[in-house]
């Protein structure tokens, strides 16, 4: 049985995910799921990022299952705090500056 997007969501509150911020994926937790009224639309999600930031009503395409973090990762940029990486992304792409929740 296939459930319609209007009745279920691929992610639930409390699920660990990666979500887009400034064009990059960062780890966080689903804080809320907003189910659409139309069966043709996918749900949106509120995400609490691990560094304390929050983003509301992210599209389904902007939220991914959190991949297991590998401690042997060769990407040394991941050693920097998330807020530092977001700041670097904002400097690199000033047009994608952080929006307040009221802008959503």
Image (cartoon, rainbow, N blue to C red):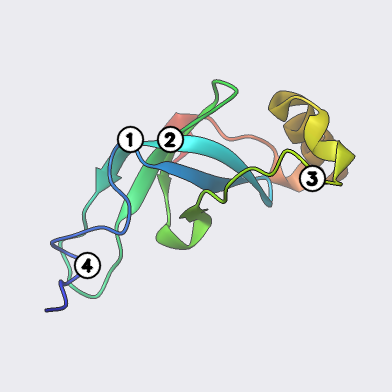
Q: Which of marks 3 and 4 is in front?
A: 3
Circle nearer the N terminus (2, 1): 1
Residue sitting at 32 percent across and 51 percent down?
A: 11
**Residue with the mark numbered 3:** 73
Residue sitting at 28 percent across and 46 percent down?
A: 12
Q: Is residue 26 left or right of residue 66?
A: right
The vertical placement of 71 against 67, above or below, is above
* CB-based contact (under 8 Å), mark 2 and mark 1: yes
The vertical placement of 61 against 54, above or below, is below
| Residue 20 picture location, percent across and down | 59, 49
Label number found at residue 14: 1
Q: How crowded is mark 4: few (under 14 residues within 10 Å), some or many (20 or more)?
A: some
Query: Where does the C terminus fall, quadrant-wise?
Result: top left
The part of the image, by quadrant, that contains residue 101 is top left
Tell me the distance, in whole angstroms, between the alpha carbons under discs 2 and 1: 6 Å
Please state which of residues 61 and 81 is positioned toward the viewer in this rendering: 81
Q: Which element type, helix, strand or loop, lies under badge 1? A: loop
The vertical placement of 36 against 18, above or below, is below
Circle nearer the N terminus (3, 4): 4
Residue sitting at 33 percent across and 35 percent down?
A: 14
**Residue with the mark numbered 4:** 5
The part of the image, by quadrant, that contains residue 70 is top right
């Amino acid at each position: 049985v296939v459930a319609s997007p209007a009745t279920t969501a691929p992610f639930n509150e409390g699920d660990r995910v990666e979500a887009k911020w400034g064009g990059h994926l960062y780890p966080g937790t689903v804080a809320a799921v907003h189910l659409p009224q139309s069966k043709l639309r996918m749900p949106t999600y509120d995400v609490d990022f691990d560094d304390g930031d929050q983003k509301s009503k992210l599209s389904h395409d902007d939220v991914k299952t959190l991949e297991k973090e590998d401690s042997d990762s060769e990407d040394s940029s991941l050693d920097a705090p998330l807020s530092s990486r977001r700041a670097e992304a904002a400097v690199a792409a000033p047009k994608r500056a952080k929006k307040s929740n009221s802008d959503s």
